[in-house]
Amino acid sequence: MIAINIAVLTVSDTRTPENDTSGQLLAERVRAAGHNPIANVIVRDEVHHVRARLGQWIIDDGIDAIILNGGTGLTGRDGTPEAVKVLLDKEIEGFGELFRQLSYIDIGTSTIASRALAGIANGTFIFCIPGSPGACELAWDQLIALQLDSDTRPCNLVQLIPRLKEV
């Protein structure tokens, strides 16, 4: 198992460090998996606030992956995908597709309102998932944890980290 550095970003107008159950859940699971949860921050659900924090983190060579939770819905305040997509060098289309497929088992057709996505920016993996604790649990347990486990076969995302910045 290769431990990597992971930052968690909660996107919300209402969460505080005391009631951010999703951010806490993700940070705890990151730690339990043997990785280093190096940041657990909350930002307002505003595109420029999300981009500013994300921009700081994607230029930090000490961060290998970022998990954003919240802001992936359809309301006027949900802007995480818009904040993130313009920063991505590559999108990992299969992540959102598979998240919605797995989510369908739990919440049925309500999963169409999820705009979960993932990609790579400056050699950093970025995962955007809904902010509910159930969605965070599903995304971590069934997708992210497995792909950030260097022992997952036949392949995993960790083995790609040394090659992400190749030109």
Image (cartoon, helix red, strand yellow):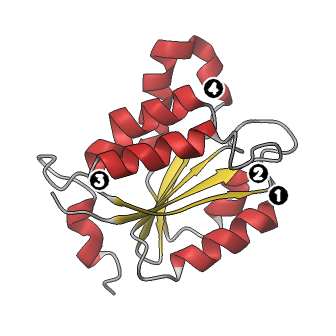
User: What residue would you read off at disc 4?
Assistant: 112
Label 3 element class: loop
Instruction: Write down the residue under mark 1.
Output: 46
Q: Earlier in the sequence, mark 3 or mark 4?
A: 4
Q: Give how far apart the Cα atoms at labels 2 and 3 are.
A: 26 Å
Position in image of residue 53 (x %, y %): 67, 70
Horizontal side of 135 relative to 47 (left or right) equals: left
Where residue 67 appears, as percent x and y from the top left, is 51, 54
State the residue position of label 3.
Answer: 148
> Percent from the top left, x then y, of residue 16?
74, 47
Please identify the residue farthest to the bottom as the structure is shown. Answer: 167
Query: Badge 1 local density, few (<14 within 10 Å), some, or many (20+)?
Result: some
The residue at 65%/51% (across/down) is 10
Tell which circle, 4 or 2, labels the residue nearer the N-terminal end.
2
| Label 3 vs label 4, nearer the camera | 3
In the figure, is residue 154 to the left or right of 133?
Answer: left
Whether pointer 1 and pointer 2 mark residues with C-beta atoms closer than 8 Å, the reply is yes
Identify the secondary structure beneath mark 4: helix
The amino acid on which the numbered mark 3 sits, given as a three-letter code, is Leu
How far separated are the C-alphas under marks 3 and 4? Answer: 26 Å
Single out the mark in the foreground, 2 or 3. Answer: 3
Circle 2 sits on which residue? 79
Q: How far apart are marks 3 and 1 (CA)?
A: 28 Å
In space, the residues marked 4 and 2 are separated at their CA atoms by 16 Å
Figure check: 89 above or below 60: above
Tell me the residue at 33%/75% (across/down).
Answer: 164
Can you tell which quarter of the image residue 138 is in?
top left
Q: Which residue is drawn at 42% across and 83% down?
A: 61
Disc 1 marks which amino acid?
Glu
Q: What element carries label 1?
A: loop
